[in-house]
Amino acid sequence: MQVSKWGDSLAVRLPKALVEKMGLIVGDEINIVDVAERTLVVQKEDRRKAALKDIASLNWTLPPDYKFDRDEANER
């Protein structure tokens, strides 16, 4: 991969095989988790899973008579 200039930053284009193997789509975030002898270890960030874990850690309890109303939630 070739390093390119992108504004004030540097960027690389990911090979199609790697994109497919990692299941990446536009907008996904990835983390470089390690660098060893000029080799990058890249990990896809699962923001949805992290957000659900954060919400679960809040231990919120809903009133026993609570009923979710999809129409009410989507009103504008």
Image (tube, grey):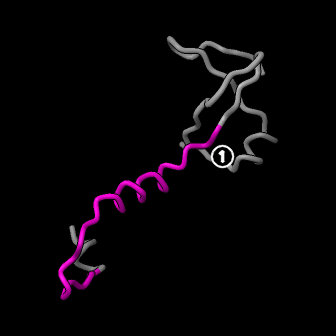
Mark 1 belongs to which amino acid?
Leu
Magenta residues (range): 43-69
x, y percentage for residue 25?
Answer: 62, 47
x, y percentage for residue 45?
Answer: 55, 43
Residue 8 lies left or right of residue 21; in this view the side is left
* Residue nearest the viewer, comparing 12 with 40: 40
For mark 1, give the secondary structure: loop
- Report the residue marked by disc 1: 24
Residue 39 lies left or right of residue 46; in this view the side is right
How dense is the environment of label 1, judged by Cα within 10 Å: few (below 14), some, or many (20 and up)?
Answer: some
**The image quarter in which residue 38 lies:** top right
Q: Is residue 64 magenta?
A: yes
Furthest residue in direction bottom, as rendered = 65
Q: Quadrant of the C terminus?
A: bottom left
**The image quarter in which residue 61 lies:** bottom left
Furthest residue in direction right, as rendered = 17
Using the image, determine if residue 56 lies above or below residue 43: below
